[in-house]
Amino acid sequence: MVWLGYAVMCLIFGTTFLMIKVGIDAGLPPFLSAGVRFLLAGAIIFVWALATGKVRFSLLWRKDLLPTGIGLTFGTFATLYWAEQHVSSGLAAILSATGPIFLLLIQSIVLRSKASRSSVIGCVLGFAGVGLLVAPNLSVETNVLWVVGCAAILVGELFYASGALYAKRALVRYPETSPLALNAIQMMHGGILLFVLSLFTERVPMEALATGQGIGALLYLTVVGSMMGHSLFYWLVARTNPFFPTTWLYISPLIAFALGALLYGEAVTWGAVAGGITIIVGILLVNLDAILGVRSAKRTQGAAVQAKQAG
C-alpha cells in the first residue's frame, strides 16, 4: 500500500502542472483559479478535521500560521500560475524542482547551518541545469515574458523553501494538531490572499468559467491535486518518514515533461532534457545525507529486530 500510494502521489503531482496549463489556456484567470483551488480544498479538509476533532476552530485565526500560507501556497502558486501563461508545463515542473536547492541555500546563508560537500556540489549542478534549460532560449527567443516567467517560478521556489522551513516550526508549536489540518489552514490563508490579488489585478471572463475545459481543470486540481495529492503525502509521512514522500520532486517533473510533450504538443529539446537530468542529479546530491541517513536508520532498525528475535 505504501508503494501504491507513493506511485499515485507522483502521478498526481506530475499531472498538476499540465492541468494548470490547460486551465490557463482555457481562459481562467491565474490568480483567481489558484485561489479557488486552494481555498476550497483547504476548507473541505478543515471542516472534516473539525468534525473528527483533529483541529480547533480558533487555530484558523492564529497569525503565526499565516507565514506558512504566504510561503507554501500564495508565493509559490501565484508565480507558478502566472508563469504558465508564458512557459510550458514541463519546463515549469523542472524549474519547480529547484525548491530543495533553495531550501539548502536559506539554511546555509540565513540560518548559518553548515552544508556538506555533496550538498554544495548539488546546488552548483542544480543551477547549472537551470542554465541549460534557460540559456538556449535566451539567445533565440525574443519573448521577454518567457524569461520573466522562468524567473518568476524560481522566485516562487524561494517562497516555497521559506514556507517549508516555517512550517516545521508550526508542526512543533502545535504537536497536538493533525499536520493535515495545519496544511488545510495554510491552504486557506494562501487561497484568500490569491483572491485578494485577483481582485486588484484580474478581470474575470465569465465565458471562461463556463467552459468544460476550464471547469474540468479546476475541479481536477482542487480534488485530485490539492485534496488527494497532499493527503497522500501526509499519509506517507505518517507511514514511513518525512524524507521518503518528498522524493516525488525527482520523479514528477519527468512525468510532467513527458505528458506536456505527448498530450499538449510541447517542444522537447536535447538542452531541456540535459538540463532536467542535471537538476535532478543536483537535487539528489543536495539530499544525499538524508538518503544515507534513512538507509542507515533502516539498517539499524532491522538489526535491532533481528537481535530481538534471536534473543
Image (spheres, rainbow, N blue to C red):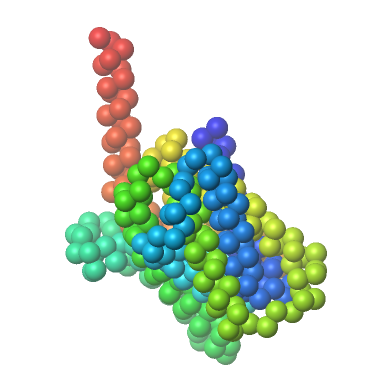
Give the percent coordinates (x, y) of residue 136. Answer: 51, 80
Residue drawn at 30 percent across, 43 percent down: 292
On-image quarter of the N terminus: top right
Residue drawn at 62 percent across, 62 percent down: 37
Above or below, 53 against 305 in this view is below
Give the percent coordinates (x, y) of residue 32. Answer: 63, 72
Locate residue 279: give its quadrant.
Answer: bottom left
| Relative depth, front residue between 293 and 270 | 293
Give the percent coordinates (x, y) of residue 8. Answer: 59, 44
On-image quarter of the C terminus: top left
| Relative depth, front residue between 141 and 6 | 6
| Relative depth, front residue between 169 and 225 | 169
Q: Is residue 194 left or right of residue 287?
A: right
Residue drawn at 26 percent across, 62 percent down: 107
Q: Residue furthest top?
A: 311
Residue 92 in view: no
Q: Residue furthest front?
A: 58
Give the percent coordinates (x, y) of residue 170. Answer: 35, 54
Locate residue 131: give its quadrant.
Answer: bottom left
Residue drawn at 38 percent across, 46 percent down: 243
